[in-house]
Amino acid sequence: MKTITLSSWITTLRHDVPASLVVFLVAVPLSLGVAMAAGAPLASGLIAAAAGGIVAGWLGGSAVQVSGPTASLTLVIAGLVQTYGWRATCFITILAGLLQLVLGAFKAARAALAVSPAVVHGMLTGVGIIIAVAQLRVVLGGDPQHSTWANLVELPGQIIDAHGHKVMVGVLTITVLLVWGRTPKHVRAVPAPLAALLVAAGTAWAFGWDVTRIDLTGAVTSWQPPQIPQGEWQLVAVGVLLVALLAGAESLLCCVATDATHTGPRADLDRELSGQGAANVVSGLLGGLPVAGVIVRSTTNVRAGARSRWSAVLHGVWVLLFALCLGWTIKLIPMEALAALLVFIGIRTISLGHIRKVHGHNEVPVYLVTMLVVVGVGLAEGVVAGLGLAALLALRRLTRVTVDKRPAPDGRLHATISGSLTFLGVPRLTQELRAIPAGTAVELDLNIDFMDYAAFEALHSWRLDHERLGGTITIDELHDEWYTMAASGARMFPAKSPPRAAHHWWLPWAHHRRLPAVAAAGQCRLTQGADEFHQHRAPLMRSIFTELARAQQPTHLFITCADSRVVPSLITSSGPGDLFTVRNLGNLVPRAGSDLGDNSVAAAIEYATRVLDVRTITVCGHSGCAAMVALLTGQRDRPDLPELDRWLRHGDPSLARLGPPGDGEPPPGDTLDRLCRLNIQQQLENLRTYRGIAERVEAGQLELVGLYFDIASARVHVVPPAPSTPSVPEPSQG
């Protein structure tokens, strides 16, 4: 235990202390800016940063998340301050923290992740626009108006009349923020917000510019107790809910996003929510802003090398010491510089990356509606509007049923139903199905993820009517057997007309329900399978093959046995374009330069490594390999199999690793299994004899992997390379 404690302290000193200092330098200017944007005392931003860092960092569920005041809550806080006053807002913050503690105790954290990201990003963008427009007026020498539209209306006149030292400080601050990322790496060690404020403050002081100064003298130590809000309790309750839910949701979403940036322990979301609640209680009691997890500080913390929660805690300690001991230095910072920093932060919330992501899921309307309502009406209204539209779009997707009908070459009609079959989609479903002429032979594919009873009734009723009028229907379910299970439970089918159960493409032909067990005379089973592919799977995969038609870009060369039981795409869960495959008897790789060399294998290796630039070569063997059986028992020596004997000489080095061959009796299972695995290791060694392979492996540009497929258990095992290369003979020549 003592060694572990000493090790943890060393880790803290090496990684967490430097990271905490970096986060501290980022947190101070941002905390002051958020407090100014919310219309709260500037000291409240530092108090919240200290409380969030120490309390949430200590009690929270994430090892690297950093909490503090966040720009996304500025609209809510500003409204509460205007309505109830600052001390009452602190009381609301305490109640919101208590609510978060209750939600954390009841394990409700996961529910916050059900909020559509489009709503969250739209809300943050709307808040950013409001902050940027309002603080731009401060940069231009004015005061923010009561609404964004009023600020926008007066903005052109302000820009025309812009002049004076205050405007110059704001422009200088934004300029530094824009160009700081292009400075040398050692210069960028200073966070851009801190650098911008230092440059602005130094320039204003050096040239004696007339700017608005900030004064925190005595603000941190002059504590006043929170005050119970005066007004209708329903509105107060709404304010508590807004602070608790918005701060909690942002913290949890930030927690999930931060988990993706580090390899440490995963976050406990319920504990994190409780930690945020405790931090809000403390912050409210001390006169600070509401606290939430902040993505900018958290990602900065990870990039700075933080390893544990001590980084967040220490950052809070540094903020507290700064506020108590060096708060007087803040008066050197021009107010206009802080406003310019907020303008920059607000504009950066408009992320094209987020817009592209929501566009990929057809949720741009949710994003835009949330953003516009937040900007034009208010934060709560925007969130409600976004959630409502997201729910309506989700409901619309449930009603979206597509029925694709096209004639098959044999005269039958092939129809595919896709989507979620619920009662909402029944009208369209029945309309499409009733349009199929009576007496038609129909092949119906159900490419669905859900079917409720109303949809089943509609589909089943149409099936019975169509068959009664002389038509035939074959139903194939491409995924789960919704129709088959519902029909079996309802027992609606007559004995002579059972439902056709689904089959899966990866089953052997004998298990296919659509194809007969034995091909009819004059028909090729492969031709039947191709027809099956054309009718049922090609339409689903055509877009993928269209993209692959331009060029192949496989990442793996896959060398395996020709055994019919080994299906590379099945046992590796790969698809078209993933594997460049070579198959032969025994998954053998002839040694380079061997007189018995096989040009086909050598050509594939050469093309894969030099043209396709694959990054992995895999040799995959399997249990019960017939080639290995022939090596063990001497069956290859039959006079009627001369080419087999010649080919299997490439397996002699593998046999030499095992020992002398058997006497013709079937090999014991463990001996055969050992040889199959040793053969994989030998072929990996043989690969290194080819020009450039060993060099690329040593340089980390190529990886050699061995796999062993146990057919009986359907398990794929990784075969490690041989610990050392024994002296093995070259393949004999005759």
Image (cartoon, helix red, strand yellow):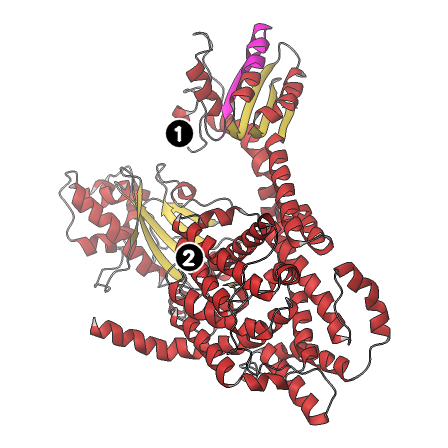
Q: Residue 705 location in percent, x, y?
A: 35, 56
| Span highlighted in magenta in the image | 460-478
Q: Earlier in the sequence, mark 1 or mark 2?
A: 2
Residue 508 numbered tag: 1
Tag 1 and tag 2, C-beta contact below 8 Å: no
Task: Say which residue label 2 marks.
Answer: 274
Say which quarter of the image contains residue 144: bottom right
* Image position of 428 with respect to 311: above or below: above
* Image position of 435 with respect to 580: above or below: above
Res 692 visible = no
Q: Residue at x 56, y 71 (%)?
A: 45
Question: Mark 1 falls on what kind of element?
Answer: loop
Q: Nearer the viewer, residue 414 or 229?
A: 229
* Image position of 519 with respect to 604: above or below: above
| Label 1 Cα crowd, 10 Å radius (few <14 / some 14-19 / many 20+) | few
Question: Mark 2 falls on what kind of element?
Answer: helix
